[in-house]
Amino acid sequence: MEFCPKCGGLMIVKGKKLVCTKCGYTKRIGKNTKTVITEKINVKDEIIVMKEDEEEKTYPSIKKICPKCGHDEAIWWMQQTRSADEPPTMFFRCKKCGYTWREY
């Protein structure tokens, strides 16, 4: 990686020259200069659509007693519901009745 001596911008290879991306300053590439050109390939992100009943399969389970039905298994997740200097809120959803509650 080389930077422009005039403005400090990034120099990129164009043909047999280095060209500044900001001011257009050009510099010839010498015969003994090694250049390595890499190219980033953009891959489109894949969006997976889940059905409502499949969503619960992705959350981890925990032994937690439901305050509504007394079942002892729930899924859980964390979410930042208050300011950043406060701890996150833990949410639980009963696997039997679907009741959702939170603990701070």
Image: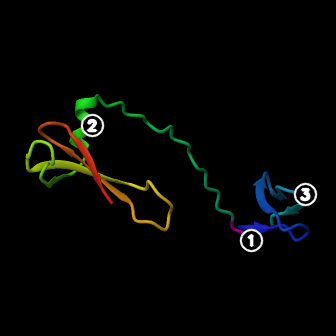
Q: CA distance from mark 3 to mark 2?
A: 52 Å
Q: What is the spatial separation of the Cα atoms under label 3 and label 1, in whole angstroms?
A: 26 Å
Q: Which residue is mark 2?
A: 55
Q: What colour scheme was applied to this rendering of the protein?
A: rainbow
Label 2, secondary structure: give it. Answer: helix
Residue at 14% in and 43% down: 68
Q: Nearer the viewer, mark 3 or mark 2?
A: 2
Residue for badge 3: 23
Residue drawn at (12%, 52%), measured in percent from left and top?
65
Q: Is residue 24 above or below residue 43?
A: below
The amino acid sitting under disc 3 is: Cys
**Could you say which is closer to the camera, residue 46 or residue 63?**
63
Name the amino acid, label 2.
Glu
* Quarter of the image where the C terminus is located: bottom left
Taking the image as shown, residue 66 lies to the left or right of residue 46, namely left
Indicate the quadrant containing the N terminus: top left, top right, bottom left or bottom right. bottom right
Q: Of the residues under marks 3 and 1, which one precedes in the sequence?
A: 3
- x, y percent for residue 69: 10, 42
Q: Is residue 68 left or right of residue 48?
A: left
Q: Which residue is mark 1?
A: 32
Q: Quick one: label 2, few (<14), some, or many (20+) residues within 10 Å? A: few
Q: Residues within 10 Å of mark 3 (few under 14, many from 20)?
A: some
Sequence order check, earlier mark of 3 and 2: 3
| Stretch in magenta | 30-34
